[in-house]
Image (cartoon, helix red, strand yellow):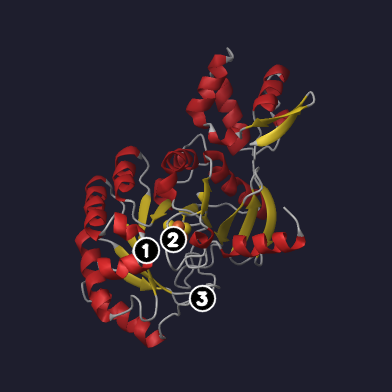
């Protein structure tokens, strides 16, 4: 919430970006404003991308003043941008309450296998911190603080586009946080990102990545109109191995998870993806690879193997290249599509949360924030 001075009081106001069309329709109707005003305001926000209500020149002065009193537009402040303009760039944002989150922008020329791609991908955060404590992940180290609002999710894209001058055409919910644990705001932000009156990104270009919250996977399959994609952070093909890496498996074990994935498959056209971080001596045996192949085959999933990237404070290592290749071959023996990421560094999955943690340490040391 942004603080606004009214008289000698500071009043918190929400961002208008999270209202969506229905919310805006209702807000205008309450004030006796004509319905077409919603279309005008949405166009100022998502097409013309204005940064103040004063710029909304086809609205009456009174309506602009009312909007100004009730809302802010973008609730994020860019604190730091890391990375060269033509490469992967990490954006660190400060929220209104001083908390920090990050987004990662991956430019078109960098396909995941080094090939040419026209995808301009933004990896967005959905929470501050995360409660799920996956053992390979830096975001879980600091624990969970709070959910991001719908506006804070949508604003990540608007801020990155404004700062970079680039157009995002692919959004992945793979940044900090478990998106399905912030279900209501996730669903509302997908609607705004996808809508023709909003950002206008196609459903197939929006991916939700989850650690496997089975009930919410089913709910998302029922609720979401857009043909979005679903990626599962699997990282273990048996309960015993997966539970060591992902405590969420104790709550929703592989039977429950796969029951939800079958449910998803029956209702959705888009292919599932399994993300599998290869960690030496932990989940990289050929038995795990064969089991992973069978599980992927059962739900028609694509397998994306990601060699582990060292996270400061965590003890694990990536397997040798020979072991990675052998693992890939064993997965493929079940006749499933599988890829192995070969690039070094810049791995947004394994590295999520790192920039925020480092910056928070610096702020503490310098006494900022
Ligand atoms: S991988 Fe995702 S769900 Fe797991 S701790 Fe990290 S942010 Fe949370």
**Residue 336: quarter of image:** bottom left
Up-down relation of residue 334 to residue 175 (above or below):
below
Q: Residue at x 49, y 60 (%)?
A: 140
Q: Is mark 2 on a helix, strand or loop?
A: loop
Count residues near mark 3 (Cα–Cα under 10 Å), then give few for <14, some for 14-19, many for 20+: some
Which residue matches tag 3? 310
Instruction: State how many labels appear.
Output: 3
Q: In this view, does 259 lie to the left or right of 350?
A: left
Mark in front: 3 vs 1: 1
The residue carrying pointer 2 sits among few (fewer than 14), some (14 to 19) or many (20 or more) residues within 10 Å by Cα, namely some
- x and y percentages locating residue 351 in the rendered image: 52, 67
Circle 1 residue: 246
Please say if the residues under marks 1 and 2 sit with CB atoms less than 8 Å apart: no
Within 8 Å of ligand 1, the CB of disc 2?
A: yes
Of the numbered discs 1 and 2, the one sitting upstream in the chain is 2
Measured in 3D between alpha carbons, the distance from the residue under mark 3 to the one under mark 2, in whole angstroms, is 16 Å
Q: Cβ of disc 1 within 8 Å of ligand 1?
A: yes
Which sits earlier in the primary sequence, circle 3 or circle 2? 2
Residue closest to the far right = 8
Indicate which label's residue lies in the foreground, 3 or 2. Answer: 2
Residue occupied by mark 2: 133
Q: Which of marks 3 and 1 is nearer the N terminus?
A: 1
Marks 3/1: CA–CA distance: 17 Å
């Amino acid at each position: 919430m942004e603080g606004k001075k009214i008289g000698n009081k500071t009043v918190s106001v929400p961002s208008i970006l999270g209202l969506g069309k229905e919310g805006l329709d209702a807000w205008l109707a309450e004030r006796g404003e004509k319905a077409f005003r919603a279309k005008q305001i949405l166009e100022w926000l998502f097409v013309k991308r204005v940064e103040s209500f004063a710029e909304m020149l086809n609205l009456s002065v009174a309506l602009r003043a009312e909007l100004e009193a009730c809302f802010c537009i973008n609730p994020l402040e860019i604190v730091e941008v890391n990375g060269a303009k033509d490469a992967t760039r990490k954006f660190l944002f400060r929220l209104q309450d001083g908390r920090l989150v990050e987004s990662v922008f991956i430019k078109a020329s960098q396909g995941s296998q080094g090939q040419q791609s026209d995808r301009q991908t933004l990896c967005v955060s959905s929470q501050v911190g995360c409660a799920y404590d996956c053992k390979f992940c830096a975001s879980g180290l600091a624990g969970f603080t709070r959910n991001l609002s719908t506006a804070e999710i949508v604003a990540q894209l608007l801020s990155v586009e404004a700062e970079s001058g680039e157009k995002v055409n692919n959004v992945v919910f793979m940044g900090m946080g478990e998106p399905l644990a912030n279900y209501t705001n996730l669903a509302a932000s997908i609607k705004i990102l996808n809508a023709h009156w909003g950002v206008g990104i196609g459903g197939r270009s929006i991916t939700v990545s989850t650690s496997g919250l089975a009930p919410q996977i089913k709910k998302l399959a029922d609720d979401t109109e857009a043909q979005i994609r679903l990626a599962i952070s699997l990282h273990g093909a048996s309960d015993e191995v997966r539970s060591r890496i992902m405590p969420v498996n104790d709550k929703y074990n592989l039977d429950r998870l796969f029951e939800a994935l079958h449910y998803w498959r029956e209702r959705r056209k888009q292919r599932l993806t399994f993300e599998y971080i290869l960690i030496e001596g932990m989940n990289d045996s050929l038995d795990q690879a064969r089991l992973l192949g069978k599980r992927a085959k059962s739900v028609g999933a694509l397998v994306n193997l990601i060699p582990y990237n060292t996270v400061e404070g965590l003890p694990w290592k990536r397997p040798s290249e020979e072991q990675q290749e052998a693992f890939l071959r064993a997965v493929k023996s079940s006749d499933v599509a599988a890829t192995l990421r070969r690039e070094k560094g810049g791995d947004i999955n394994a590295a999520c949360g790192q920039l925020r943690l480092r910056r928070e340490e610096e702020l503490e040391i310098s006494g900022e924030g």
